[in-house]
Amino acid sequence: MGLGRSAAVVIGGFPLGESDRVVRFYSRDYGRLHGVARAARRPRSRFTGALELLTLGELVFFDTGRSDLVRVDHFDIVQPFARVREDLARLAEGAWIVECVGRLTAERDPHPTLFGLLVRALRSLEAAAPPRRVAVVFGVRCVDALGHRLRTDACVVCGRARPARGAVAVDVAAGGTVCARCATGDLPRVDAATLAALGRLRALAWREALGMALGGAEAELRGLLDLQVAHLSGQPTRTSRFVREVERFAEAWGSRR
């Protein structure tokens, strides 16, 4: 039986039996892990309050080697990110962020850079940065870090340079933009200015990217990220609909005030 220890973020979970819980973690040293927290749902459990979604902590576990599930021994809270869970818009974007991590990574495949991006995004949400902006900046860096950067300077089919103005077709399956001559089917289109903004976001430091003026490009980039993550994972993220519902509710509520 091997003992493991790592900083980790809770990215999901579900009940098991009468009192246990299966918890999904994304850890700095082991990547994505599934673990069983015995008696976690009992009133006096030592895990009480520690296994909430988005919580950052120090994970200690035992790995028997006989199952994909490890046995969670301790999870000591480092940063609970309670303020994120208390705000619906921040919770929605935080849930989207951790779902992307869960869908785009393999079990026990560590990626310290991605772990650092995840923690930075959650801390930015906690610090009251605009939630959708945090999600966009994280999403751009996440897919790039995992080797799925879209090519946006030229057509991925023929190599023709991307136009400086107007709508540009994007084929996420092919890996980037497609010129009018090579575009086939009903491909999504984004403004060339949005692709230029994407290039600037990639080059800026995290804080600078959070403060960059994006205007309408932000919504287009978020939609493009949703398409890319859906393609890479094989299905749309469950949290995307939740995010859209929260945004519609916020707009409707604002219009009544």
Image: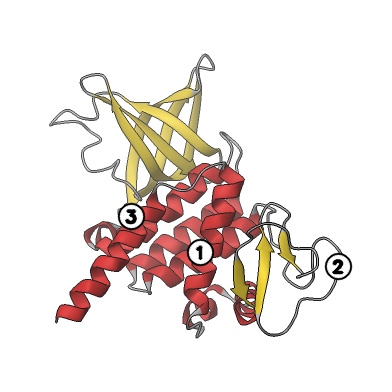
| Kind of residue at badge 2 | Gly
Instruction: Kindly identify which residue carries mark 3.
Output: 242
Badge 3: few (under 14), some or many (20 or more) residues near its Cα, within 10 Å? some
Residue 165 higher or lower than 10, as above or below: below
Badge 2: few (under 14), some or many (20 or more) residues near its Cα, within 10 Å? few
For the point 50% across and 22% down, the residue is 68
* Left or right of 250 on screen, residue 119: right
Q: Earlier in the sequence, mark 2 or mark 3?
A: 2
Residue 7 higher or lower than 250, as above or below: above
Find numbered disc 1 in the image and state the secondary structure of the residue it sits on. Answer: helix
Instruction: Kindly identify which residue carries mark 2.
Output: 159
Q: CA distance from mark 1 to mark 3?
A: 14 Å
Q: Nearer the viewer, residue 148 or 128?
A: 148
Instruction: Kindly identify which residue carries mark 1.
Output: 223
Q: CA distance from mark 2 to mark 3?
A: 38 Å
* Left or right of 8 on screen, residue 22: left
Q: CA distance from mark 2 to mark 1?
A: 25 Å
Place of residue 19 in the rendered image (x, y in percent of width and height, measured from the top left): 21, 23
For the point 71% across and 62% down, the residue is 176
